[in-house]
Image (spheres, grey):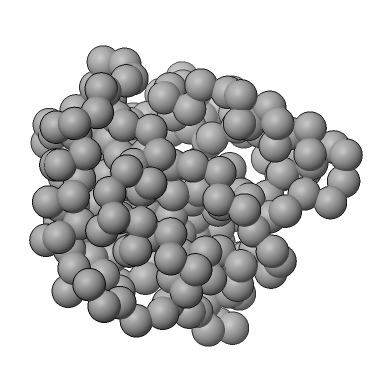
Amino acid sequence: MKLAPLSVTEADVTHFRTFGFLHLRGVQKDVAPQIADAFEGVFERFPLVGRQGRAGVARIAERHEVLQEALLADGRCPQVARQLLGTNVAYVGGDGVRYDGATYWHRDGNHRNLRLLKIVQYLEPLGPDSGALRIIPGTHRRGGSWDTFAAEMANPDQHFGMKPTEVPAFVIESSPGDLIAFDPHSYHASFGGADNRRQITTTYTAVPESMAARQELSDYLLADRSVL
């Protein structure tokens, strides 16, 4: 399998740093069927973990040579992570997941010092009413008034008088072969998706330079990621 290196422009970097996400369309379209086959192969061989509505295999990209080449080869996702985070990065895992039903508004942790980038791809076409990823732009920024946002987002019906699906957000419609890079501290969700939606993620961290960031990285690695 021959794959071209991935890279992003300065405008892409600015978009990511401003809004907290970047949609890379069609960058793996030619190998999307092979990636889907590899996903199914891994799910047949490894035990699933998770909770109701979310069954997954941890570190899926390391468990099949097709996924290793498409997701972990240095000129691809790690290169994108270095450009978007603006520093050296380390791979800290990821998973393959089958989702059933909605994923409600949440963010993956509340780290003050740890900088993360999650790269996700979906193996089915997804739109606003079929489980596409929704992100509230700018909520990757930490500190200040955003820290009070968690309580409101836990129950938007009570606090805003609107259903979770009505919360203002950007819906990232995607097709197999697309990659979505986003800061997992952003508030994100999906609604309306059919059962058995397939997702692959890889996550990178900016190499921590402070003691506080190193401690948060340690806590992140020890946390139960199956609940996110």
Residue pictured at 72% horizontal, 53% vertical: 207
Residue 217 vs residue 15: left or right? right
Q: Which residue is drawn at 59% across and 83% down?
A: 10
Residue 32 drawn at (x, y percent): 17, 63
**Residue at screen point 53% across, 36% down:** 107
32 or 101: nearer the viewer: 32
Is residue 11 shown left or right of residue 31? right
Q: Residue 136's spot in the image, x, y percent?
A: 48, 49
Figure check: 21 above or below 192:
below
Q: Reply above or below: 221 against 34.
A: above
Does residue 137 appear anywhere in the picture? no
Residue 103: percent from left, percent from top: 33, 31
**Residue 56, located in which quarter of the rendered image?**
top left
Q: In which quarter of the image is the C terminus?
A: top left
Q: Is residue 171 left or right of 45 when viewed as pictured?
A: right
Q: Can residue 203 be seen in this view?
A: yes
In the image, residue 93 sits, relative to residue 30, either above or below, namely: above
Quarter of the view holding residue 60: top left
Percent x, y for residue 222? Answer: 61, 24
Which quadrant of the figure has residue 127? Answer: bottom left
On screen, residue 86 above or below 140: below
Question: Along the line of sight, which residue is nearer the eye, 148 or 100?
Answer: 100
Residue found 41% across the figure and 79% down from its top: 5
Image side of residue 190 versus residue 16, left or right: left
Q: In which quarter of the image is the N terminus?
A: bottom left
